Image (cartoon, rainbow, N blue to C red):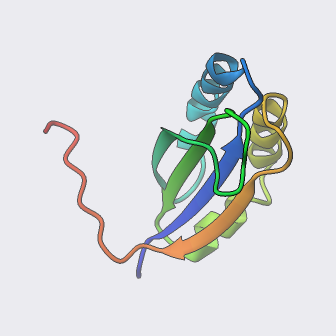
Amino acid sequence: MPMHARITQFKVRLGKLEEMAEALDTLVPMMLQQKGFKSLIVLRGAALPGNTSEAPVITAITTWDSLDSLRASEENLYFYRAMARVLAFSDGFPTIQEHEVLVNEYHPGA
């Protein structure tokens, strides 16, 4: 069964990057309790295309053992708690996409 990923992009309010990172970090213990959760990576990038502000963009990528697990996580209270925490530092609602993982190779010791 192929793995699946949720990719969420947040436009961070100016001056709130550190608080956003802290809020995301506090979510890790909750995510580890979710059935089918495999990994989380959070990236900081430049502004989104068409965005003229200096606000950074945070991209959070979670991987799941199946599409069912990914979607079930959205029905869990943790998902809404997570959104509430990070939305406090976000400018607008994030973009959220689901993807099938074609290649997955991760070496934590490398």
Residue found farthest to the bottom: 1
Question: Percent from the top left, x then y, of residue 33?
Answer: 58, 42
> In the depicted view, which residue is nearer to us: 69 or 20?
20
Residue found farthest to the front: 52
The answer to whether residue 84 is left or right of residue 56 is right
Q: Quadrant of residue 53?
A: top right
Q: Say which residue appears at 72% left-offset and 18% top-offset.
A: 15
The answer to whether residue 22 is left or right of residue 64 is right
- Quadrant of the image containing the C terminus: top left
Tell me: residue 67, above or below residue 93.
below
Q: Say which residue appears at 75% left-offset and 59% top-offset.
A: 74
> In the depicted view, which residue is nearer to us: 26 or 89?
89
> In the depicted view, which residue is nearer to us: 107 or 75?
107
Question: Percent from the top left, x then y, of residue 96?
Answer: 70, 61
> In the depicted view, which residue is nearer to us: 61 or 108?
61
Q: Say which residue appears at 16% left-offset and 36% top-offset.
A: 109
Question: Percent from the top left, x then y, of residue 106?
Answer: 25, 52
Q: Say which residue appears at 52% left-offset and 59% top-offset.
A: 36
